[in-house]
Image (tube, coloured by chain):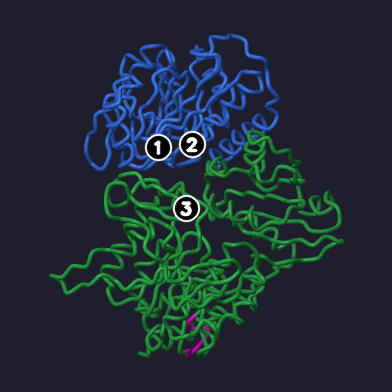
Chain colours: A blue, B green
Amino acid sequence: MSTESLRIVWVYPDLLSTYGDRGNALILARRAQLRGMPVEVLEVRSDQRLPATADIYLIGGGEDGPQALGAQRLLADGGLHRAVAQGSVVFGVCAGYQLLGTSFFAKGTRCAGLELLDLSSDRGPTRAVGELAGEVDPRLGIPHLTGFENHGGRTHLGPGVSPLARVTAGVGNDGATEGAWRGKLLGTYSHGPALARNPDLADLLLRWATGIHQLPPLDDTWADRLRSERRNAVAAAARA
Amino acid sequence: MPMRAKVASSVSRTAAALSRAAGRGDGSVIGGWIGLKIDPDLLAHLSAGRAIALVSGTNGKTTTTRLTTAAVGVLGRVASNAFGANMPTGHTSALAKAGSTPYAVLEVDEHYLAQVLEATEPHVVALLNLSRDQLDRAKEVAMMAQLWRAALVRHPRVRVVANADDPMVVWAATPPGDPAQGHVPPHVTWFSAGQRWHDDSWVCPECGSTIQRSGGQWWCTGCPLRRPEPQWTVEDDGVLDPTGAWHKIQLQLPGTVNLGNAATALAVAAEFGVRPVDAVSRLGTVTSVAGRYAQVDRDGRNIRLLLAKNPASWLEAFDMADVAPTLLSINARDPDGLDTSWLFDVDFSPLAGRQVLITGDRAYDLAVRLDVNGVPFRHVRTFDEAVRAVPPGRLEVIANYTAFQDIRAELDRVN
């Protein structure tokens, strides 16, 4: 950790907050606090400088216009690139995932991304709306991914990244893979409060940020019930 | 009315009556659906000769429509789609069922405002608010504001009553006139009803700059868009009208949000020539609206139903609810939207210290949310279990759309 407390930055909530994106900051803070870690959550708006010294950066979903504007401002600001160079964790969701790549489509034009992940996004033939599930890259050591997706993009991964998961329901990147990760950067189409349904993913980000390999376990009764309910719902929908 | 429209109108009424008799529903959609199949222009035909007000927005439509109907009732009979069937089929059913009336007040789903403006040629349209709602299928907020704005450009003669506190509504209500086409900007009367939810209007819809807020005012930091001076405002427990006269409002509906709805109703009625002094007592006759705010006594518990469909309306519900045991129920069926992510846009901490029960198809989503909020709760499987779990006295029930209808059914479809 950079300082005595874990610093979480929610990047541009004025632009990139569409589907309960605040949830990811709340969940990380809660799970850190329950383990006795002091936490500071900073909401940095797009007209403010992005501090380069935080531990975790959260980038949420947004409409085309705000996504393009957010990418422009992050490129101009440079704070996120400096943070990544210093080993900070970045978690991008939906539009926030796409803009970590080399390029994405918004409002019908190709926009420059931050080039932090080796991937590019364009428009798919249809909008992907619904439950998303997948088996996570075993190297990450966490159970299956569950979420809800709502996006029109398709994302193509380059050799410099690994897929976060292999899709078992929904579309994700392209119907086969979902999300991407490299080092301590991770992105997913599981939108909004993705960590609510994936507490182990939240803990993975916390482990990356703190360097603590064994976090004390928490009572995840409700999250576990939610996960199995969603898994059953997806299975039932597949049978129907 | 042309013969085809007469036949369609009559068949529409019959179908609605049959639907009610068969216990299949309240007939507010099926009749209109059949009528429109026979005569696609039926809504326009049924609207002709009536002075019409449309009421649209994300939240408060049904209640404001009911209050406006009461206020305009000073002048004569008013047709209205009182039960929240707010798409053209519902409007058609309501007008066909009401027969000939001089006035109509119609609640309109925000996605259908352009279409219904076209069909009904209203005298006035009330624009309440725009906020995120069912994003898995609804239009995003800025896009909705753009649709409204484009629709108003095509109807420059309609009088607009709009919420000065919502930047998205203000922008939608003030399209530039196009002198080349003989268009003038619409005539707008502004009301201020306060706004608890700000998270969908941080970015200016006109220029993309940041919107700043302070002490009830708001302004864009990059262009001239700013809060217009309202002519109707809520002050204490009453409404200040454009002449500066203050009218005490005694409602049977809870919460400051309903005072705002009352101010809107008076402003709309005034566009028909209704004096507020003549209308205020009528507002107090509205008790519950399609089950919303209904109170039912069961086993010594006084159960009150509050509908909350999206983040903005949950915030208002917490404000309305008494500090009492509270049942929260969440579904995610088609009418609710399939995505529960919005639960994290709502701060549930106002419920801390109350006995909280949760139920519904998606109770586990709610459980995780409350856990993160540090609000203790108990999960119950049925409504009866909830009633038994709380002591005698008030039980507040806050539920989203289909969860609300499920509980209403448990209470014999209370209105």
Instruction: Identify the residue shown where x is 40% and y is 61%.
Output: B111
Residue A236 drawn at (x, y percent): 59, 39
Q: Chain of mark 2?
A: A
Q: Which residues are magenta?
A: B95-101
Local secondary structure at mark 3: loop
Q: What's under tag 2, amino acid-wise?
A: Asp
Residue A155 position (above or below residue A207): below
Labels 3 and 2 in the same subunit? no
Q: Quadrant location of the N terminus of chain B?
A: bottom left
Q: Nearer the viewer, residue A132 or A66?
A: A66
* Disc 3: which residue: B215
Q: Residues within 10 Å of mark 3 (few under 14, many from 20)?
A: few
Q: Chain of mark 1?
A: A
Q: Can you tell which of label 3 and label 1 is closer to the viewer?
A: 3
Q: What's under tag 3, amino acid-wise?
A: Gly
Q: Chain of mark 3?
A: B
